[in-house]
Image (cartoon, rainbow, N blue to C red):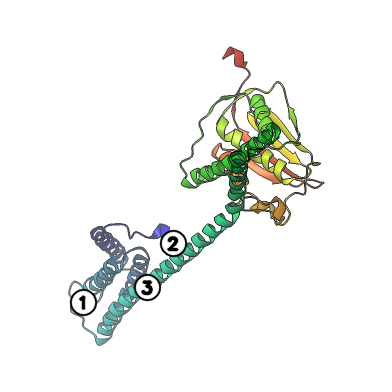
Amino acid sequence: MDIFLFKKIDKGKQYLYCAAIIALVSAGCFGLSGFMGYRVAALILLVTVSLLAIAFDILPVLFSAFLSAFIWDFFFIPPRFTIHVDTTEDTILLIMYFVIAMINAVLTYKIRQVEKISMLKEEKANSVKLYNTILNSLSHELCTPIAAIIGATDNLQSNTNLTQGDKEQLVNEISKASIRLNQQVENLLNISRLESGHIKPKADWCDITELVYDVVNRVEENNPGRKIHISINQHLPLCSLDKGMLEQVIYNLLNNAAIHTESSSRIDISVTCHADILNIIVEDTGKGFEGVEIKDVFDKFSRSKDLKSSSSGLGLSIVKGFTEAMSGNVALEKTNSHGSKFVISIPVKTSFIKVADL
């Protein structure tokens, strides 16, 4: 209903709008007075006052009710063009019209206020729920790498009997924990950018093959022992799109697959481009999304019921947001076997000019 409310308009202008609307409706009724009686005009004016009560503040609406009653008396009730009323019946009708118009205006306004209070309470409850969800979702994801960094740093500082191998292992743990922490911070920043609505893709020519191999190398370095299988047409053209967004989309999909599947599960990424549509498929043979509806997979904080593979639940929401920001589409498709299959389609401009020629 908020789209029909005009409370932000200055009160003076609200009075003018109300008066203008009542005048226009009255003029229309007056022009049709030869085809309808003055009682029908009263009903039309009452409906008009009710609609104004939905849109404007209480005082301008009460003014509209008074103005409509005066106009109905002066222009419609016989004898016309005078405030005098001949019959007792018409006098009672005029009084009842004025009372009903006032009560209708007040009650409609009160109903609107109750709805507004209810909406505010619901928004507050949702904010509290979202706050608790964020804390529950991110507490483990943020605390775990921080604890690893602090523990490894304390060992390096306090333990003087560490061998060179032990020191290298601790430094490696700090590095991995830092990368994981940085990823979570990036997810929070990216989701805030998406929520603000200020994110706009910056298109530039990009070698998709090089980008995919770089992202795959990063994921494999951050997840030792995982091997990602790549299938890309070596004659893939250069594509004009936002490289940073696409890189984040591919990284989140591959990293999620690497983290939330067994080490024996296979992870595949394939890239093709036909008719200026870039198609990317990321598929794994893991357990899939247990306890989560496919339509809810891309919602913020949507996670599997399997606690071992739970995470902040922001990665796939960012994938969807960035893909749609590039005018693309991402979907999770069912496969015959276990696992998940993400299909991304992004419209792009293409060029077969070699990078060396640019």
Please give the name of the residue rendered at 59% of the width and 12% of the height, measured from the top-left corner.
Answer: 357
Contact between marks 1 and 3 (CB within 8 A): the answer is no
Q: Is residue 300 visible?
A: no
Give the crowd class for mark 2: few <14, some 14-19, many >=20 residues within 10 Å.
Answer: few
User: Which label was assigned to residue 110?
Assistant: 3
Query: At label 1, which amino acid type do we have?
Result: Pro
Please give the name of the residue rendered at 33% of the width and 60% of the height, measured from the top-left corner.
Answer: 7
Residue at the outermost bottom position = 88
Q: Is residue 338 left or right of residue 81?
A: right
Q: Is residue 342 left or right of residue 183?
A: right
Pinpoint residue 43: horizontal percent, then vertical percent.
Answer: 35, 73
Pinpoint residue 270: horizontal percent, then vertical percent.
Answer: 73, 32
From mark 1 to mark 3, how far is it between C-alphas?
36 Å
**With respect to residue 11, does 231 lie above or below?**
above
User: Which label was assigned to residue 1?
Assistant: 2
Q: Which residue is mark 1?
A: 79
In this view, the residue in front, 282 or 86, is 282
Give the crowd class for mark 3: few <14, some 14-19, many >=20 residues within 10 Å.
Answer: some
Pinpoint residue 48: horizontal percent, then vertical percent.
Answer: 34, 67
Contact between marks 1 and 2 (CB within 8 A): the answer is no
In this view, the residue in front, 191 or 94, is 191
From mark 1 to mark 2, how far is it between C-alphas?
41 Å
Give the crowd class for mark 1: few <14, some 14-19, many >=20 residues within 10 Å.
Answer: some
Query: At label 3, which amino acid type do we have?
Result: Lys
Residue at the outermost front position = 161
Q: Earlier in the sequence, mark 1 or mark 3?
A: 1
Q: Earlier in the sequence, mark 2 or mark 3?
A: 2
Quarter holding the N terminus?
bottom left
**Callout count:** 3
In this view, the residue in front, 45 or 121, is 121
In this view, the residue in front, 84 or 69, is 69
Query: At label 2, which amino acid type do we have?
Result: Met
